[in-house]
């Protein structure tokens, strides 16, 4: 029973909390188990049909490493080929390095997985031996390319030396793969210029881009049946397989009758979303208000905090009577934080406290509503995306790899307010600047700002931001829990805040004013909504998978039947 329980524990919970040593150990066991099981299954099937002839194995197999979680597959395939199938090192490496392809999904250095050599050696001693051998041969190649450049060798080594040596899993994936790609054009460029610059200089031909996509069959046809019917009635059903056909909707954007039908569908979807918010949050949303939505993983770089600061700013404006040309707005925030992510959980707490304060204030009722959606999930997003007017994609420029929520919202006719980050750049290129609410520092400007950042000076110079900070610091949202939001206040005011929340506040508030003014012009907003859907054709997984296949997998496509 003990052995059975120990085995079942490996796959009982995916992505366990790795804040503790036990959690880290379980994660590594889990990653190795799943990678090894997959490889052994493939090899067993190959042996069944081809015996011990592996001459065409690399031609017929490709393993796409989806971030660093399965990168144990590189040394594990070597172990299986060398130890289990009796292959020589060079022949095994020739197969391994021609079958592995690595997709990177993050620009955050701290998110690139590392495992302590101590833990790795205790759990997977044979794999660690293989990693050291891969590293020895790799660094020999680096030394030949840059003789005497010991600093570069240390930077590129698969082992990060120090008091607690670490195995750099992303570097292992790069060295063991024939293809390395990012998931948006900017992301791929930043990988090549930043995180993986040394590797790009060594192997420029390995690196490429594959912009993410989402499937229109789930996120439009199934999730938004009312809009799907209207689109099909207008341009036919070809868009379900060829999303580029949505371009044909653009010619209908100036048709008053079509805009009227589009608005009817959108309002019905907003009623459905309002029902979800009422059921899950106990908060009433007015379907005629601007539905301003940010749902995604809770992380400082995604800047839910910037959104909350703006909500507080709107609250102050209403309380002060600065409500000329006011646009009623309902703000929905949702997402989950990693179990051990303290500051993210504190941001959730602030969102809930601000919502509680605003929703309970009769002076602002009907003009501003706020809700934090618990248990954010796919089935909820299928209701949220069709009912959203304004999609918040406000990450610090240079930090978001791609994003896919931005695509789901766009596909369903939401306008985006966002920075030049991740796939936002390509979304803006497709839909045009007039139909996208751009704000904030660029990636280059953000990097320059960090070198001399003084958030206290920024706050002092901006009366609106100063008022927001003073209200938070007064304890208005944590009257009976003193110090509750001190960590958040400290983070915003820190000159080392990598997310530059204070720096982008003024531009964000101005962009929100532009969005509010646009929403008051009903025809302009509806036209913008139609054009966003019409321009979303690029962001289909069909296109993404075709690019992976053409550039990496080299499979022969099979036409769909029926």
Image (cartoon, grey):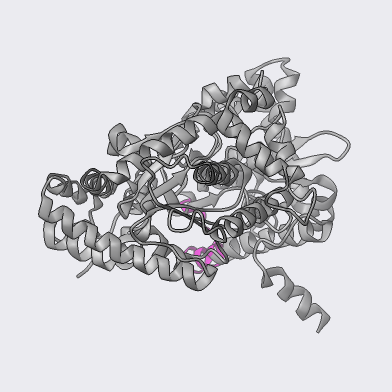
Q: Is residue 289 visible?
A: yes
Residue 449: name its quadrant. top right
Q: Quick check: is 354 in the magenta stretch?
A: no
Q: Against 342, is 323 above or below?
A: above
Please provide percent x and percent y for residue 536: 29, 47
Please provide percent x and percent y for residue 262: 21, 57
What residue appears at the point 60 percent right and 51 percent down from the top-left corner?
298
Q: Quick check: is 49 in the magenta stretch?
A: yes
Image position of 205 (left or right of 306): left
Q: Nearer the viewer, residue 469 or 17?
A: 469
Residue 337: name its quadrant. bottom right
Q: Nearer the viewer, residue 65 or 302?
A: 302
Please provide percent x and percent y for residue 464: 56, 33
What residue appears at the point 59 percent right and 41 percent down from the top-left corner?
301
Quadrant (top left, top right, bottom left, bottom right) of the N terminus = bottom right
Image position of 164 (left or right of 513): right
What residue appears at the point 75 percent right and 56 percent down from the top-left corner?
18
Span of residues in magenta? 42-57
């Amino acid at each position: 029973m003990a052995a059975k329980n120990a085995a079942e524990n490996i796959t009982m919970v995916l992505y366990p909390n790795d804040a503790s040593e036990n959690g880290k150990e379980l994660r590594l066991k889990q990653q190795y188990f799943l990678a090894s099981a997959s490889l052994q299954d493939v090899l067993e099937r190959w042996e069944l049909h081809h015996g011990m002839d592996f001459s065409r194995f690399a031609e017929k197999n490709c393993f796409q490493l989806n971030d660093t979680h399965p990168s144990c597959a590189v040394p594990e395939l070597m172990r299986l080929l060398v130890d289990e199938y009796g292959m020589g090192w060079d022949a095994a490496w020739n197969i391994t390095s021609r079958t592995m392809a690595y997709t990177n999904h993050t620009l955050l250095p701290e998110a690139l997985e590392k495992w302590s050599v101590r833990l790795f050696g205790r759990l997977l001693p044979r794999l660690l031996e293989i990693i050291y051998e891969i590293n020895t041969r790799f660094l020999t190649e680096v030394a030949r390319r840059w003789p005497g450049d010991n600093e570069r060798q240390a930077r590129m080594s698969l082992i990060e030396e120090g008091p607690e040596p670490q195995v750099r899993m992303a570097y292992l994936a790069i060295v063991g793969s024939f293809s390395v790609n990012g998931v948006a054009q900017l992301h791929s460029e930043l990988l090549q210029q930043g995180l993986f610059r040394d590797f790009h200089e060594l192997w420029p031909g390995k690196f490429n881009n594959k912009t993410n996509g989402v499937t229109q069959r789930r996120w439009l046809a199934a999730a938004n049946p009312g809009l799907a019917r209207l689109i099909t009635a207008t341009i036919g059903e070809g868009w379900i397989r060829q999303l580029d056909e949505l371009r044909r909707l653009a010619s209908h954007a100036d048709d008053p009758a079509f805009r009227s039908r589009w608005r009817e569908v959108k309002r019905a979807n907003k009623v459905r979303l309002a029902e979800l918010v009422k059921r899950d949050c106990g908060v009433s949303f007015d379907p005629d208000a601007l539905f301003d939505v940010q749902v995604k993983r809770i992380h400082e770089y995604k800047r839910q905090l910037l959104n909350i600061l703006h909500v507080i700013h709107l609250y102050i404006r209403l309380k002060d009577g600065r409500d000329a040309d006011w646009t009623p707005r309902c703000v929905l925030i949702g997402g989950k934080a990693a179990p051990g992510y303290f500051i993210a959980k504190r941001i959730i707490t602030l969102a809930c406290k601000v919502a509680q304060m605003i929703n309970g204030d009769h002076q602002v009722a009907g003009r501003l509503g706020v809700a934090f959606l618990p248990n954010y999930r796919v089935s909820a997003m299928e209701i949220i995306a069709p009912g959203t007017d304004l999609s918040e994609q406000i990450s610090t420029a240079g930090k978001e790899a791609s994003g896919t929520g931005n695509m789901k919202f766009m596909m369903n006719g939401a306008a985006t307010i966002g920075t030049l980050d991740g796939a936002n750049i390509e979304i803006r290129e497709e839909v045009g600047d007039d139909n996208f609410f751009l704000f904030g520092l660029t990636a280059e400007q953000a990097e320059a700002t960090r070198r001399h950042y003084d958030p206290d000076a920024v706050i002092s110079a901006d009366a609106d931001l100063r008022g927001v900070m003073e209200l938070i610091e007064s304890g208005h949202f944590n009257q009976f829990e003193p110090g509750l939001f001190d960590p958040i206040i400290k983070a915003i005011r820190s000159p080392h805040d990598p997310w530059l929340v204070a720096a982008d506040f003024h531009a964000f508030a101005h962009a929100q004013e532009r969005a509010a003014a646009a929403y008051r012009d009903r025809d302009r907003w509806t036209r913008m909504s139609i054009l966003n859907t019409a321009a979303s054709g690029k962001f289909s997984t069909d296109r993404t998978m075709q690019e992976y296949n053409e550039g990496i997998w080299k499979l022969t496509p099979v036409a769909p039947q029926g």
